[in-house]
Image: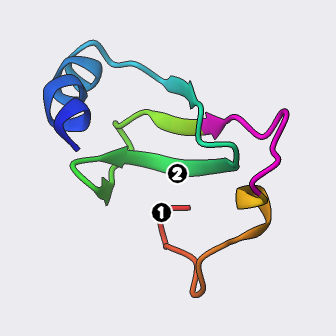
């Protein structure tokens, strides 16, 4: 959360379209997001890190799914 608060205004101001992040050992993609809400001017976030996934986190999805995901 500290990283989001520190970086998100910079990404938004620079009109970043796409952010790749990883090391969650799962995969998820989000709609355009800014300040934890859908925003057509915010970047799309893609979290990738399922390569080598031994923990099984890639199979453990939250239900109901977030509207942002």
Read off the residue under disc 2. 31
**Real-space Cα distance between discs 2 and 1?**
6 Å
Read off the residue under disc 1. 68
The extreme bottom residue here reads 64
Q: Where is residue 60 in the image (x, y as percent from the top left)?
A: 71, 71
Left or right position of 23 against 43: right
The quadrant the C terminus occupies is bottom right
Q: Does the magenta stretch include residue 54?
A: yes
Q: Position of residue 50 (x, y in %)?
A: 78, 40
Q: Is residue 57 above or below residue 13?
A: below
The quarter holding residue 4 reads top left
Tell me the magenta residue range. 47-55
Q: Where is residue 66 in the image (x, y as percent from the top left)?
A: 50, 73
The quarter holding residue 24 reads top right
Q: Residue 37 carries which label?
A: none
User: Which residue is painted at 27% across and 12% down in the image?
Assistant: 14
Q: In this view, does 26 lie above or below 23?
A: below
The extreme front residue here reads 54
Q: Position of residue 46 (x, y in %)?
A: 60, 37
User: Which residue is painted at 68% across and 35% down in the image?
Assistant: 48
Question: Tag 1, which secondary structure?
Answer: loop
The extreme top residue here reads 14
Query: Would you say the residues marked 2 and 1 are in contact, meaning their CB atoms lie under 8 Å apart?
Result: yes
Q: Does the magenta stretch include residue 53?
A: yes
């Amino acid at each position: 959360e500290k990283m989001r608060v520190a970086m998100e205004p910079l990404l938004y101001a620079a009109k970043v379209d796409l952010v790749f992040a990883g090391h969650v050992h799962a995969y998820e993609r989000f709609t355009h997001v800014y300040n934890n809400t859908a925003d057509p001017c915010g970047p799309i976030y893609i979290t990738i890190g399922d390569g080598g996934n031994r923990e099984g986190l890639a199979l453990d999805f939250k239900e109901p799914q977030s509207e942002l995901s």
